[in-house]
Image (cartoon, coloured by chain):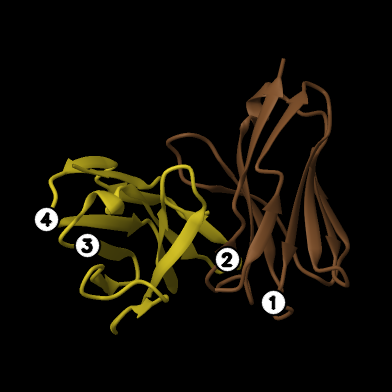
């Protein structure tokens, strides 16, 4: 599996702040980039996903920015809330129905 | 999205024994996958469960250790065989739906003593 590198490993943000998580990939054949949110004891839940034909996708407080030339994509959580405290995983695949290669995960804590 | 259930939700097993994990989906799906998530780690694909044929395993995973069945389009099992403490992980099934997204089950938390 080609590697997907995710940073930071952990992140502490004040309530109302912006949380930013970054990922970089190697395989240029990847064309589907989802983000998953995982709470303790639960399976990962799909948060938002993007394809390389767009540079940004926004859903509510969550935005993915995508830079194809740099092979990087990031998740921005606006107005972060304590309920957003979870582990976030970026992933990539050659198409949406194929196996996912996951980043290492980011443990986000939003302080009240 | 598909509703995915896994059984058991957690188990504590003795070294050398085997455990079969079930994954049930409430609708027919083409693709089903099994992942492993070791404590505090990310997810690693074990295999793709193919309906009506042998599973496709990723590097580092073999059928003798992780036999998989997929008898129909809504059900799959993963067996963790001859367990050791290193097999202690969360095992997750995921499915791909027609909306081209992958959804995960709640996971099975396995502890091997």
The reply to whether residue A79 is visible in this rendering is yes
Count residues near mark 2 (Cα–Cα under 10 Å), then give few for <14, some for 14-19, many for 20+. many
Where, quadrant-wise, is the C terminus of chain B in this rendering?
Answer: top left
* Spatial separation of the CA atoms under disc 3 and disc 1: 31 Å
**Disc 4 on helix, strand or loop?**
loop
Q: Can you say whether B92 is above or below B33 in the image?
A: above
CB under 8 Å between callouts 1 and 4? no
User: What label does residue A27 carry, if any?
Assistant: 1
The percent position of residue B37, horizontal first and vertical second, equals: 43, 52
Tell me the residue that label 3 is attached to: B79
CB under 8 Å between callouts 1 and 2? yes
Colour for chain B in the figure: yellow
Count residues near mark 4 (Cα–Cα under 10 Å), then give few for <14, some for 14-19, many for 20+. few
Q: Who's brown, chain-wise? A: A
Q: Chain of mark 2?
A: A
Q: Can you say whether A17 is above or below B44 in the image?
A: above
**Disc 2 on helix, strand or loop?**
strand
Residue displayed at 47% across by 61% down: B44
CB under 8 Å between callouts 3 and 1? no
* Spatial separation of the CA atoms under disc 4 and disc 2: 30 Å
The reply to whether residue B29 is visible in this rendering is no
Q: Can you say whether A80 is above or below A104 in the image?
A: above
User: What label does residue B16 carry, if any?
Assistant: 4
Tell me the residue that label 2 is attached to: A101
* Spatial separation of the CA atoms under disc 1 and disc 2: 10 Å
**Disc 3 on helix, strand or loop?**
strand
């Amino acid at each position: 599996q080609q590697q997907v590198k995710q940073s930071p490993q952990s992140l502490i943000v004040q309530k109302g702040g912006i949380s930013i998580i970054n990922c970089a990939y190697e395989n240029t054949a990847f064309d589907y980039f989802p983000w998953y949110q995982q709470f303790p004891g639960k399976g990962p839940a799909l948060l938002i996903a993007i394809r390389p034909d767009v540079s940004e996708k926004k859903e509510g407080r969550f935005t993915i920015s995508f830079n194809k030339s740099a092979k990087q994509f990031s998740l921005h959580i606006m107005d972060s809330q304590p309920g957003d405290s979870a582990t976030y995983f970026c992933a990539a695949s050659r198409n949406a129905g194929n196996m996912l290669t996951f980043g290492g995960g980011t443990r986000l804590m939003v302080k009240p | 999205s598909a509703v995915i259930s896994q059984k058991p939700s957690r188990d504590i097993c003795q070294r050398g024994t085997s455990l079969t994990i079930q994954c049930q989906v409430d609708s027919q799906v083409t693709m089903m996958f099994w992942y492993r998530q070791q404590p505090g780690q990310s997810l690693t694909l074990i295999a793709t469960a193919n309906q009506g044929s042998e599973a496709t395993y990723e590097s580092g995973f073999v059928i003798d250790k992780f036999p998989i069945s997929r008898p129909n389009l809504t059900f799959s099992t993963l067996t963790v065989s001859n367990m050791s403490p290193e097999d202690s992980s969360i095992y997750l099934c995921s499915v791909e739906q027609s909306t081209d997204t992958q959804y995960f089950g709640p996971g099975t938390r396995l502890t091997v003593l």
